[in-house]
């Protein structure tokens, strides 16, 4: 902590929140909210005179509310930076702090939150974790029984810098406990709350037990556990040491804690799996080793940063094994428990790893980004052909990358274009294309996928970032789904042109899936919104045409939802299986002219006619091979 | 930017090479790659199709690079794993052989085929063929592209002042990179600062 404050290249902005992140790798614009401290950082010398003078006492979050702090405060004496704040919600404005501060004149009640913009090349997200509140588990009586405490409360109670100067006492009578029970997996490995293992709690219980035993060898400690997990260097040895010190380990998750209302002693009811017996033991004090959970504002941060979340709410890495530090957004990296519960050595290692990943970019003068940007054919833009710009491209663009002035054709500012393809699909004149994802390329792919028995196929459009990743995860997890799925990839659901969907059905596709990111995960800010609006228009059109429900399906599937991808495809297969073949054939044939009607401009799109001619040849090659067999 | 897509990319002869990866038994354990090779040979403009045990391994990449020269390939299709896995690998490989990296297309026949359809081997084989054909269809219309160079602001931001954030900030700063460390609470330190001694060495946390 102190190293960070001393390092001249680190600018510590405490009491500051990230409000907005815009831009792209090498060129992020981050808006910070520097919250008002009502103390001038340039004048406060950290003497603490204001705290002494302040008459208001409120619970201190840093001490797990076991001790008070003043309204003029620092959370702890070693705070970095050592600059006091006035907690305006609790301040009674007696101005005693102002008098105490005297000639320094550091206290400034006129301060307001300040929004600051910073230009940043790369971002490391290390927002950490929060703790499960065990009061929801009635069986353990936390918050009802005074002598049931959490692990974090234990940390403060046996800490020499804590409210009791390190003397562990029972909240009910301030006596030192002689017998203690620690309960592991409180809120973790529990399907009612969090199914995952919280990673560090086994070691954490053992550590507290060893500490207490070192302070007082007579204290009797039992750790109730499901499994002891000690898979890192030196951990198993540490566990051995705890057993040698006489700490008891009892396998089996306790089902109930009851209290003697007079003594406030506690009875822990459990099944001891080793003995095969139900036990009920009395303790002076019980510590609940609560689960690590995502930060309460993790959902909010996920949308500010435009990064996805895994099941459980943690941030989602680009690849769990091969790119465990990268976010899907180039230039944004993760470190520590924001990705999932992690102990200190792993968090420190990930901090270093994220710094190394980020410094690849930060040591470069320039960085390469994908050239899959939009390009305009000016002679097709209505501004040029009709002297009237429709402006749909401008509306579709989340980045303000389309320049449209007077009767001049729209122009894409390449440096601003992120390549979602929204403007391409929205343009009614087909005057815009996307490099590497042209209509001709996509059409040729679709024709190949639907060459044989199209009525049996489900053409699945997936965005690159989320649903393509979801499909990958379905495979990686070996969630089986119908082999009739035929996947197409575009960068964003915004690129999924109505023409592609009409064409898929014109070609006789049995089903079409229109899938992309959930709106809050969209890699292109509002690209998904553009795609979603179009998809629901298409859905209405198909409903009006009398298409069987479920043949066209819209689903938002994140890269973490492999199970959902598999389920959706299997459900679509069920829909097809439930239509008698002759009825499906009849429906497909009946709707073909409807599709053709809506595709009348499609052959005029540059490259499409060529792609049609080529595809005929390709389809012939595919079908003739099958016939030959 | 020039209107690259409007230029006819297919001036001159197209020569497509198709590589079907076994990925050990990950793909070959479910479908016979040779069947896909045979199928690909029959597709228009495919002048070379072969299978390879591991396309991503040095030997697999070497095969592709040598073939580009030997068969004068101007488009490459690799039917293997996810683009999220090895697209950069194969782009780099074809670039080393002098081909524009954007003239290479992957078909995902592992994550999105053999791994997901182990229960239906015939279906998986048909799908692997179709995905390969779809990639062949796409490469025919691909154009040469260059990466876009953007300038880099040589300044970092670390969000969160716990042990991971402090570690990242120190490592960045010690390399001479200006780093802003943002913390929402009044002090950095995070959960670690609240802890008493820490395992397994029992040293203090701050």
Image: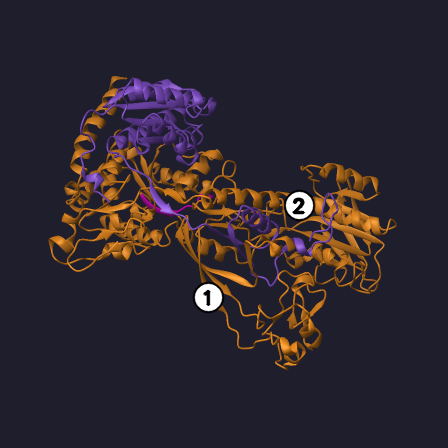
Chain colours: A orange, B purple
Q: Which residue is mark 1?
A: A115
Task: Find numbered disc 2 in the image and state the secondary structure of the residue it sits on.
Answer: loop
Query: Dividing the picture into quarters, in which one does residue A90 lie?
Result: bottom right
Residue A200 image label: 2
Query: Dividing the picture into quarters, in which one does residue A625 lie?
Result: top left
Residue B60 falls left or right of residue A508: right
Residue A203 falls left or right of residue A538: right
The answer to whether any part of residue B39 appears in the image is no
Read off the chain for label 2: A
Is residue A553 one of those drawn in magenta? yes
Q: Residue furthest left?
A: A386
Stretch in magenta? A552-560
Q: Residue furthest bottom?
A: A94
| Nearer-the-camera pick, A271 or A173 | A173
Residue A382 image label: none
Q: Position of residue A42 (x, y in %)?
A: 57, 68
């Amino acid at each position: 902590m102190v190293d960070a404050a001393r390092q001249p290249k680190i600018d510590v902005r405490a009491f500051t929140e990230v409000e907005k992140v815009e831009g792209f790798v090498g060129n992020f614009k981050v808006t910070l909210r520097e919250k008002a401290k009502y103390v001038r950082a340039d004048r406060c010398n950290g003497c603490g005179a204001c705290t002494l003078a302040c008459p208001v006492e409120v619970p201190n979050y840093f001490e797990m509310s076991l001790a008070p702090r003043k309204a003029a405060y620092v959370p702890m004496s070693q705070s970095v930076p050592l600059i006091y704040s006035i907690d305006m919600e609790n301040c009674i404005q007696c101005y005693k702090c102002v008098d105490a501060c005297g000639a320094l004149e550091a206290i400034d009640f006129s301060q307001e939150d300040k929004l600051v913009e910073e230009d940043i090349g790369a971002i490391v997200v290390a927002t950490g974790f929060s703790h499960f509140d065990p009061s929801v588990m009635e069986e353990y009586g936390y918050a009802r029984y005074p002598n049931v405490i959490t692990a974090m409360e234990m940390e403060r109670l046996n800490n020499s810098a804590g409210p009791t100067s390190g003397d562990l006492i029972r909240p009910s009578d301030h006596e030192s406990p002689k017998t203690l029970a620690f309960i592991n997996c409180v809120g973790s490995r529990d399907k009612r709350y969090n199914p995952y293992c919280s990673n560090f709690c086994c070691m954490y219980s053992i550590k507290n037990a060893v500490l207490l035993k070192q302070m007082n060898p007579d204290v009797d400690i039992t750790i109730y556990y499901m499994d002891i997990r000690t898979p890192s260097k030196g951990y198993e040895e540490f566990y051995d040491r705890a057993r040698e010190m006489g700490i008891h380990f009892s396998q089996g998750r306790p089902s109930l804690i009851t209290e003697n209302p007079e003594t406030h002693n506690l009875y822990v009811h459990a099944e001891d799996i080793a003995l095969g017996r139900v036990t009920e033991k009395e303790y002076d004090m019980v510590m609940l080793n609560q689960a690590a959970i995502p930060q309460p504002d993790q959902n909010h941060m996920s949308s500010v940063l435009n990064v996805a979340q895994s099941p459980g709410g943690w941030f989602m890495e680009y690849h769990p094994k091969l790119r465990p530090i990268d976010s899907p957004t180039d230039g944004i990296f993760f470190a520590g428990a924001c990705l999932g519960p992690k102990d200190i050595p792993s968090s420190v290692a990930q901090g270093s790893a994220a710094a190394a990943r980020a410094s690849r970019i930060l040591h470069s003068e320039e960085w390469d980004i994908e050239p899959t940007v939009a390009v305009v054919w000016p002679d097709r833009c209505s501004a040029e052909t009709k002297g009237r710009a429709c402006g749909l491209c401008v509306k579709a663009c989340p980045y303000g990358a389309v320049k449209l002035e007077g009767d001049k054709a729209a122009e894409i500012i390449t440096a601003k274009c992120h390549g979602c393809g929204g403007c391409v699909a929205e343009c009614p004149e087909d005057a815009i294309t996307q490099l590497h994802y042209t209509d001709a390329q996509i059409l040729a792919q679709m024709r190949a996928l639907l060459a044989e028995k199209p009525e049996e196929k489900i053409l699945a459009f997936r965005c690159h970032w989320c649903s393509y990743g979801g499909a990958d995860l379905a495979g990686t997890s070996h969630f089986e789904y119908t082999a009739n799925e035929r996947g197409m990839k575009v960068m964003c659901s915004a690129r999924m042109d109505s023409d592609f969907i009409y064409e898929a059905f014109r070609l006789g596709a049995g089903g079409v899936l229109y899938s992309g990111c959930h709106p809050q995960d969209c890699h292109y800010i509002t690209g998904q919104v553009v795609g979603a609006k179009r998809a629901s228009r298409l859905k209405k059109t198909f409903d009006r045409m009398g298409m069987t429900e479920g043949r066209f399906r819209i689903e938002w599937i994140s890269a973490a939802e492999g199970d959902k991808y598999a389920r959706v495809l299997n459900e679509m297969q069920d829909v097809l299986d439930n239509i008698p073949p002759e009825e499906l054939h009849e429906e497909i044939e009946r709707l073909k002219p409807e599709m053709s009607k809506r595709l009348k401009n499609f052959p005029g799109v540059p490259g499409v006619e060529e792609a049609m001619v080529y595809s005929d040849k390709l389809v012939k090659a595919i079908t003739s091979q099958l016939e030959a067999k | 930017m020039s209107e690259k897509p409007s230029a006819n990319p297919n001036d001159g002869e197209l020569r497509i090479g198709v590589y079907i990866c076994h990925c050990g038994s990950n793909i070959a354990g479910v479908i016979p790659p040779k069947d896909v090779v045979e199928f690909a040979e029959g597709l228009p403009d495919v002048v070379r199709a072969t299978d390879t045990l591991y396309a991503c391994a040095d030997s697999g990449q070497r095969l592709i690079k040598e073939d580009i020269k030997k068969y004068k390939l101007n488009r490459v299709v690799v039917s293997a794993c996810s683009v999220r896995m090895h697209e950069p690998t194969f782009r780099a490989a074809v670039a080393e052989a002098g081909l524009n990296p954007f003239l290479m297309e992957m078909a995902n026949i592992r994550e999105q085929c053999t791994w997901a359809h182990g229960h239906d081997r015939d279906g998986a084989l048909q799908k692997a063929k179709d995905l390969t054909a779809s990639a062949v269809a796409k490469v025919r219309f691909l154009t040469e592209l260059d990466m876009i160079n953007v300038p880099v602001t040589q300044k970092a931001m670390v969000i969160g002042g716990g042990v991971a954030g402090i570690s990242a900030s120190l490592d960045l700063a010690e390399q001479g990179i200006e780093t802003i460390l943002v913390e929402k609470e009044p002090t950095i330190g995070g959960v670690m600062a609240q802890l008493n001694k820490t395992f397994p060495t029992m040293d203090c946390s701050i």
